Amino acid sequence: MNMQRKLTTLSLLLVALLLLAACAVPATAPTADTATGEESATAAPAEEADSAASGEEFIVGALHVGSINDAGYNQAHHAGLVAMTENLPNVKLIEAENVPESADAERVMENMIQQGAKMILAQSFGYLDPALNVAAK
């Protein structure tokens, strides 16, 4: 019984520690190193935001393994993409549904790039090899 009490106490302490860690205020990353003048990784998104604010169109391509009306993952992902375009100025979305996890996916990604896509979201593990092939070009 004594051992069970120790395990219970240890478990409660662990839960309390995890809760405190989750509630901690994250440290902010510095935006520039004054000694070297190097910018941090947070500078790149600011530059992208500036280009979006200037009216430059940013095209995002998305491949779906199924229909965007499947009442499942593909539909949820489509809804998130639509919300993205509604909330981010100058973002245009190109989507392709029912794309097989084969060389056809590579062809679809290349077509999206020809249409100006700067980012392609390939939402299936089966798209990994075609995506790596396209990225290598």
Image: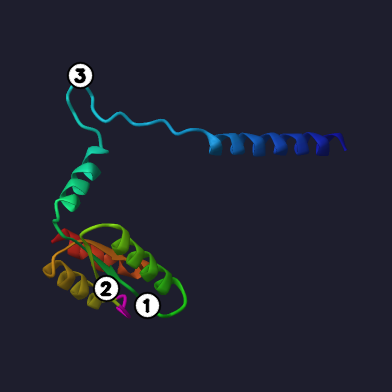
Along the polypeptide, which appears first: circle 3 or circle 2?
3
- At mark 1, the secondary structure is loop
Q: Residues within 10 Å of mark 1 (few under 14, many from 20)?
A: some
In this picture, which residue range is highlighted in magenta?
97-101
Q: Which mark is residue 68?
A: 1
In contact (CB < 8 Å): disc 1 and disc 2: yes
Q: Residue 67's quadrant in the figure?
A: bottom left
> In terms of depth relative to the viewer, which is nearer, 45 or 36?
45
- Does 29 appear above or below 46? above
Where is residue 80 shown, x and y percent of the image? 38, 64
Q: Residue 64's quadrant in the figure?
A: bottom left
The residue pinned by badge 2 equals 95
Along the polypeptide, which appears first: circle 1 or circle 2?
1
The Cα atoms of the two marked residues, 3 and 2, are separated by: 45 Å
Taking the magenta stretch, the answer to whether it contains residue 99 is yes
Q: Which mark is residue 35?
A: 3
Q: Residues within 10 Å of mark 2 (few under 14, many from 20)?
A: some
Where is residue 40 shown, x and y percent of the image? 25, 33
Instruction: Tell me the quadrant of the picture where the C terminus can be found.
Output: bottom left
